Amino acid sequence: MAGFLQGVSTVSATGEIKKVPLGGGPSVTVCKTPLLYGASWGSNDTIVFANRLGGLSQVAAAGGTPQPLTTVDAKKEEYSHRLPQVLPGGKAVVFTIEKTPYRWTTRRL
């Protein structure tokens, strides 16, 4: 995290999560991912992010291969997990559970 803007950007044309150096210069690719539906950079130097479908994933801010963090529960009619926010300390994440696409009335935290 040192020396980099603690924020996440995605480039939709290439499907990448990137980070930007604080002192300027080119962005650095963290990982490739399809459509991004929220991301949060934790104090433990892990980026937690959501795609359009499925559960949350996590990747080291230094880069690497994303790893699953949550999985949707079909028995509870979950569609996707989105809009993650890593809490201080990096040991917990608050996120939205979407049950029906495009309907905010069916979402839960």
Image (tube, helix red, strand yellow):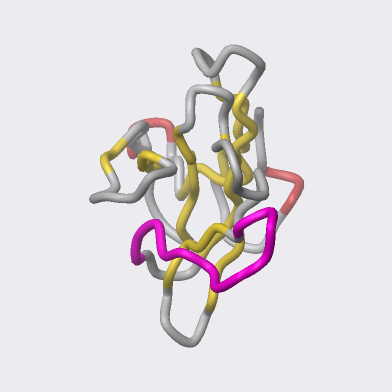
| Quadrant position of residue 10 | bottom right
* Quadrant where the image shows the N terminus: top right
Whole-percent x, y for residue 34 in the image? 40, 69
Q: In this orientation, which residue lies closer to the viewer: 9 or 24?
A: 24
**Residue farthest toward the front in the current orientation of the protein:** 23
Q: Is 31 covered by the magenta stretch?
A: yes
- Figure label count: 0
Q: Considering only vertical position in the picture, is 94 above or below 74?
A: above
Q: Which residues are magenta?
A: 21-32
Q: Is residue 25 left or right of residue 66?
A: right
Kindly identify the residue that appears in the image at 42 percent across and 57 percent down: 53
Dividing the picture into quarters, in which one does residue 42 lie? top right
Residue at the spot 67% in from the left edge and 65% down from the top edge: 24
Q: Nearer the viewer, residue 93 or 18?
A: 18
Q: Nearer the viewer, residue 5 or 89?
A: 5
Q: Is residue 20 left or right of residue 73?
A: right
Vertical relation: 79 (above or below) 58: below
Residue extending furthest right? Answer: 105
Query: x%, y% of residue 38?
Result: 60, 52
Q: Which residue is most to the bottom?
A: 13
Point out the image quarter for the C terminus. Answer: top right
Query: Looking at the picture, how far across and down is residue 37, in whole percent?
Result: 57, 58
Residue 3 point in image, percent of width and height = 60, 44
Let me know if residue 25 is in the magenta part: yes
Q: What residue lies at 60% left-to-right and 54% top-to-bottom?
A: 8
Q: In the depicted view, which residue is nearer to us: 19 or 51?
A: 19
> Which residue occupies 58% across, 24% down?
43
